[in-house]
Amino acid sequence: MIITDTHTHLYSEAFDEDRDEIIQKALDAGVQRFFIPAIDSAYTDAMMDLESRYPDNVFLMMGLHPTHVKENYKEELAHVEQLFSERSFYAVGEIGIDLYWDKTYLKQQQEAFVYQIQLAKKHQLPIVIHSRESFDEIFEILEQEKGDDLYGIFHCFTGTFEQAEKAISCNMKLGIGGVATFKNGKIDQFLNEIALKHIVLETDSPYLAPVPFRGKRNESSYIIKVLEKLSSIYGISMEEIASITTENSKQVFGI
Ligand SMILES: [Zn+2]
């Protein structure tokens, strides 16, 4: 069984004490592919280091996270663009709009999102979207930018059935993680109406640990709990879910 974690911040300080152990634990559990979203330039070195130590398992994205769009966002975007001119990545991510923490930079977040969508189109890469309390703002931009050259993953999807269908119609797969196991997570109630070909698995570790680890530090091996949940929702084996979602991830990332 090959499981793909399409979204894990393995370079985070949260793993500084035991990163290799955590990776080994995930590998032993069958999680062999880790897709790594960027946050901002402060983490670039740590991401590259991770990639050089696990070249067969770690696949990097590059982008500016919406909660890190601040006064200096133009410099940060220049850093992202510079890296894309030097080497390749598997996606532009994570990018989007987050109005949960702070609405001060909404305009700049919108601008950075559009800018990075253009970058993805230019490099023929998928985007990985971060959306928090911002469905309308995200879809406004997706509707305007959509086309055959725009595709990717709606990371940590927590919307309604209608929003899921809308995301899918914009060539997005739904990134499903720990929230699917939450009692009040809601998406488990309609997920069986969404074809599995639209789903990829993720942890978003160190955040959003699934039940029974909810509230603790998340790690890639916990993705098994998400697999278990999806297996019961769809009524097929964990192996089949792992295989289909890994295929879907290959389709998106091209590896
Ligand atoms: Zn993330």
Image (tube, helix red, strand yellow):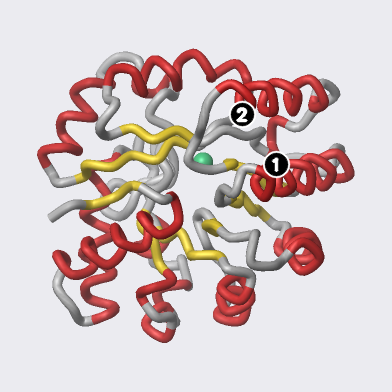
Image quadrant holding the N terminus, namely: bottom left
Residue 81: which quarter of the image? top right
Q: In this orientation, which residue lies closer to the viewer: 35 or 208? A: 35
- Tell me the tag on residue 119: 1
Disc 2: residue Cβ within 8 A of ligand 1's nearest atom: no
Q: Residue at x 57, y 33 (%)?
A: 62
Q: In this orientation, which residue lies closer to the viewer: 203 or 250? A: 250
Disc 2, SS: helix
Neighbour tally class for label 2: few under 14, some 14-19, many 20 plus, Cα within 10 Å: some
Q: Residue at x 16, y 66 (%)?
A: 238
From what the image shows, is residue 30 above or below residue 192?
A: above
Type of the residue with mark 1: Leu
Residue indicated by mark 2: 84
Residue 20: which quarter of the image? top left
30 sits to left or right of 137: left
Give the mark, 2 or 1, whose residue is nearer the N terminus.
Answer: 2
| Image coords of residue 108 (percent x, y) | 85, 39
From what the image shows, is residue 126 above or below residue 26?
A: below
| Image coords of residue 55 (percent x, y) | 29, 26
Q: In this orientation, which residue lies closer to the viewer: 136 or 102? A: 136
Give how far apart the Cα atoms at labels 2 and 1 are: 9 Å
Q: Residue at x 23, y 68 (%)?
A: 241
- Residue 206 visible in the shown view: no
Q: Disc 2, disc 1: CB below 8 Å?
A: yes
Q: In this orientation, which residue lies closer to the viewer: 220 or 208? A: 220
| Image coords of residue 72 (percent x, y) | 82, 21
Q: Residue at x 30, y 61 (%)?
A: 247
Type of the residue with mark 2: Phe
Disc 1: residue Cβ within 8 A of ligand 1's nearest atom: no
